[in-house]
Image (cartoon, helix red, strand yellow):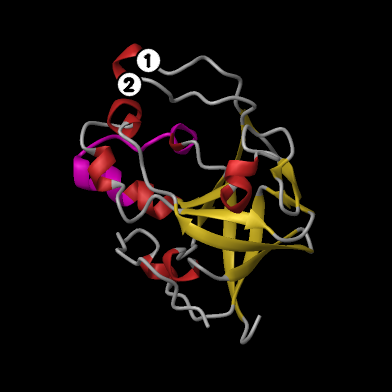
Amino acid sequence: MTGTYRYNVEILHLLVSPAHAYFGRAREGAANVPTTDAESVELVAGKGIVGDRFFGKAAHMDAAVTLISIEALEAMAAELGAAPFDPLLTRRNVVLRGAHLAPLIGGEFALESHGQEVRLKAGRPANPCAWMDQMLAPGAHKAMRGRGGVRCQPLTDGVLHRGPAVLISPVPLEPERAGEASMLRASRLP
């Protein structure tokens, strides 16, 4: 990575689910699938999170791990006048506090957790689905546009743990903007 900027973040949640919960029409309800909010997760380069529904799936190799900022969810709930959202209902794998994710799209970055660095490539935005209106609050689907997080491919093997972490970026980030909607379509990364 050219240039290195380090940001203290916190890994709040690590979601692992072996099956999809949101498919079909939302009015039929979500599937009852086991979901774990793990203390730690193992990432395998090019495959994803061990035990997760996207692990090793060819169609999801470049987007097997999803990250979202808790500030985005807090801003959405405030805008909608809703109670705080359960971040696990977004079905994003890694929920971070203090992470401005949009500028990472299209480039490589790293998360350092418990002294171990895991490199990731942020491929594209994690766009919300209509299920968010059903699972979070009416209007959440629209409110989540531009702040649904990023879909990533792990470039190295490693383990992420809940708790303090460091986001290592090749570009400067603005953590105070973590909850803002971004219409970023292409990377600012070199």
Q: Say which residue label 2 marks.
A: 26
Q: Secondary structure at mark 1?
A: loop
Find out whether residue 154 is within the magenta segment: no
Pointers 2 and 1 in contact (C-beta within 8 Å): yes
Type of the residue with mark 1: Gly
Marks 2 and 1, how far apart in space?
Answer: 5 Å
State whether residue 163 is above or below residue 177: above
Looking at the picture, how far across and down is residue 132, in whole percent? Answer: 33, 34
**Horizontal side of residue 112 vs 86, given as left or right:** right
**Residue at left offset 53%, top offset 83%:** 190
Name which residue type carries label 2.
Ala
Q: In what element is the residue under mark 2?
A: helix
Residue 88 spot, x, y in % from top left: 49, 34
Visible in this render: residue 78?
yes
The residue depicted at 47 percent of the width and 75 percent of the height is 173
Residue for point 51% across, 42% down: 92
Image-quadrant location for residue 116: bottom right
What number of labels is visible? 2
Question: Which residue does the numbered mark 1 point to in the structure image?
Answer: 29
The magenta span reads 75-89
Residue 85 painted magenta: yes
The residue under the point 66% across, 80% down is 1
Residue 167 visible somewhere in the drawing:
no
Please give left or right for residue 26 compared with residue 170 in the image: left
Q: Is residue 21 left or right of residue 40?
A: left
Q: Nearer the viewer, residue 38 or 84?
A: 38
Q: Position of residue 21 (x, y in %)?
A: 49, 23
- Residue 189, given in percent of the width and then of the height, sits at 50, 78
Q: Main secondary structure of the magenta part?
A: helix
